[in-house]
Image (cartoon, rainbow, N blue to C red):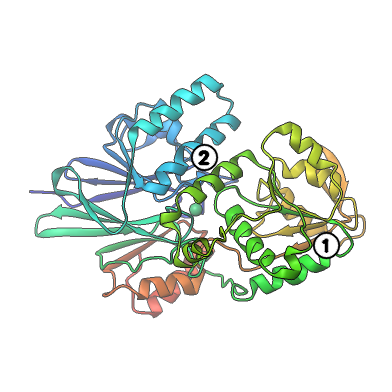
Amino acid sequence: MNSFPTLFHLGGENCVTGSCHLLQVAGLNIFVDCGLAQGRDPLSDMSEWPVSPKKIDYLFLTHAHIDHIGRLPELIQNGFDGEIICSHPTKELLVPMLTDAMGFGGLGSREIKKMSDRIDDLSWGFECQQEFKLKKGVSFKLSRAGHILGSSFILFSLPVENGNYRIIFSGDLGNYNTPILPDPDVPDPCDLLILESTYGNRLHGGREDRLCQLEKKMLKALSDNGKVFIPAFALGRTQEILFELDRLFSKTKWREKKIPVFVDSPLALKITEIYSRLDQYWDAESKNLQATGDHPFDFNHLYSVARFRDHKTLLDIQGPAIIIAGSGMCTGGRIVGHLAQGLTEEKNNVFFVGYQAKGTQGYDIMKYRQRPGGYVWLNNDKTRIRAHIEMLSGYSAHADQQGLLDWVALMPEKPKRIKLVHGDPAAQKELRKKLINAGHNVD
Ligand SMILES: [Zn+2]
């Protein structure tokens, strides 16, 4: 007789980073995600987990963002030897993302290579929308979540006394009509839904007219031959921005301007190359563009800046120019050098396309941009903010409150229970209220 499945939330239960869950069933230890916590979010000690990393049979990864995969090297150092299961694109993105993160973690290049090879050996890519069997009567199915390339939600079918118990882990859910990505799939019915709630209390807005907004703001920003800096995360956001710029430059009046666009980030370049190669996982819009001879996120005056030497040269380039670099919240990476030099000039511009968390340089730039004498600390220097700062809305990779409610409502029948994770308490409280109003049973 099989005992009932037990679930432990070892990270990301009431906060947005550090996603990590343990499912115990039929003597198996199944992990879903093993992410790094960021900012003030708590990080559990592996030695205090209910099971040792050595005893984990399977580690499922919903997608390749660091707050879902970042502790994998630590897990392996602590004896993990099980199978890593994810979608094909996640498998491709896993090693570049972790190799980059390990570089910042102080590991030497030989150790990084060894660890990357180990991760590659242990991990397996699977197709979406197909059911696969594991040991002890457990099976799983991955479905597309529309958050970044390869992002999936996972349905587990677990053997219990009177049949099967079905659990869905939503992972991070994306939006409909996101460039390059297929829309989120319709979820199957289930007994328990573990649902993310990052924007459980927010509505995004602005998605429909964002290209129009980008065009207007870009025109104004470049009219005085200034530079436009776009701080962007390497995975997901950079490719989305390149897609939008590609759309813009497909218009004759923009094409003729030949404004150079630089991607100044070795990681973003590597990820963009992977996105480009995995064209079978694109949505119909991108496939159609490619079929007409227009690569959806590559154009004539787009330049790669990989070497540090070239980054140094780029710092002194004259505008008009568009420079995309990480990190997305300006806490490090090559964007810092650009801002340290360019933020003090009035003709330059910064376009934020993502959330800026409190305590980051990006947050300070947003906050102090309009104050007389406003400044931000960059490279230990007080840098005056004279450049024009814009926040472009409509670029979130997460579904908002309505998006989450709509996705749950797509289920052919209501899930028997919903447990909210991956959100701040305020976001969870609001979303819980809305779900209960819609007739759901929420923990
Ligand atoms: Zn994510």
Residue 23 at x, y = what percent? 28, 47
Residue bearing the label numbered 1: 222
Residue 442 at x, y = what percent? 35, 68
Earlier along the polypeptide chain: callout 2 or callout 1?
2
Q: Is residue 202 left or right of residue 137?
A: right
Front in this rendered view, residue 221 or 15: 221
Q: Amino acid at mark 1?
A: Leu
Instruction: State which quadrant residue 414 falls in.
Output: bottom left
Q: Is residue 325 left or right of residue 417?
A: right
Q: Give me the residue at 82% from left, 63% from top.
A: 221
Residue 51 at x, y = what percent? 30, 35
Instruction: State which quadrant residue 270 falls in.
Output: top right
Q: Does the beta carbon at disc 2 come under 8 Å from ligand 1? A: no
Q: Is residue 206 left or right of residue 398?
A: right
Q: Give me the residue at 78% from left, 59% from top.
A: 367
Q: Amino acid at mark 2?
A: Met
Residue bearing the label numbered 2: 97
Q: Quadrant of the C terminus?
A: bottom left
Residue 254 vs 135, above or below: the answer is: below
Disc nearest the viewer among 2 and 1: 1
